[in-house]
Image (tube, rainbow, N blue to C red):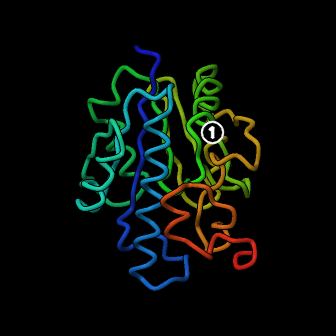
Amino acid sequence: MTGLWVLLVPVKSTRLGKSRIQLPPERRARLARAMALDTVTAIASAAEVGRVVVLVDDETDGELLASAGTVTVHRSAVTGLNAALSEGLSLPEAAGHPVAVLPADLPSLRSAELDAALRAAAGVAFAVVADRQGTGTTLLAARDRALLRPRYGAGSFASHVAAGAVPLVVPAESGLRRDVDVLEDLRGVTGPLTCAESGELGTDTVAG
């Protein structure tokens, strides 16, 4: 087993996803694509990451994200996040490596933050990082793919802890915990493509 991580990044179709962001459909889709590109670019640039596997519903999203560095694109043949991740874990790319999962809506993520979390995760068999609210999951990581048990859905952080994942201590302001689900989550976002697309939506005046 090599020390470098395989990162699985599930991407719900940007044409349909992020429905809680109250914007016209086309602008919401552009924002979702910008967030995914910022996120995958940061992941691909992390020193602890050896391979990024993007799990897509939409072939167009896959073509876009393939440009973000050393990225393998897999078109999911199943529906539902947990099913897509189970499929991703079965891919040859995930064999023989520590494996982690990150969502594609972390546009403020910095590679150094991910590297620090993955180094901490390497010290336990199965690890989890909570979102800012403390209820959802951002990073889910395991030394071996057989140990990674995705339990995404409402209250996923508690579900992952109940399944044996060790919570990692990550500052609330870290980009690793700053997923974007609603307009208010764009406040202070730092990803360059997301900043360009969100414009005034990311300012304290508008989003605060």
Q: Residues within 10 Å of mark 1 (few under 14, many from 20)?
A: many
**Residue placed at 33% from the left, 51% from the top?**
65
Position of 31 compared to 156: left or right? left
- Please state, as top left, top right, bottom left or bottom right, where the C terminus lies in the image: bottom right
Q: Residue at x 50, y 45 (%)?
A: 102
Q: Quadrant of the N terminus?
A: top left
In this rendered view, identify the residue nearer to me: 166 or 203: 203
Q: Position of residue 43 (x, y in %)?
A: 48, 40
Amino acid under label 1? Val
- In the depicted structure, whether residue 80 falls above or below residue 112: below
Residue that carries the numbered disc 1 in the rendered image: 128
Whole-percent x, y for residue 71 in the image: 32, 40
Where disc 1 sits, the SS reads strand
Look at the picture and state if 18 lies above or below 145. Answer: below
Residue that appears at 38% across and 37% down: 52
Quarter of the view holding residue 2: top left
- Name the side, left or right, on which 201 lies relative to 67: right
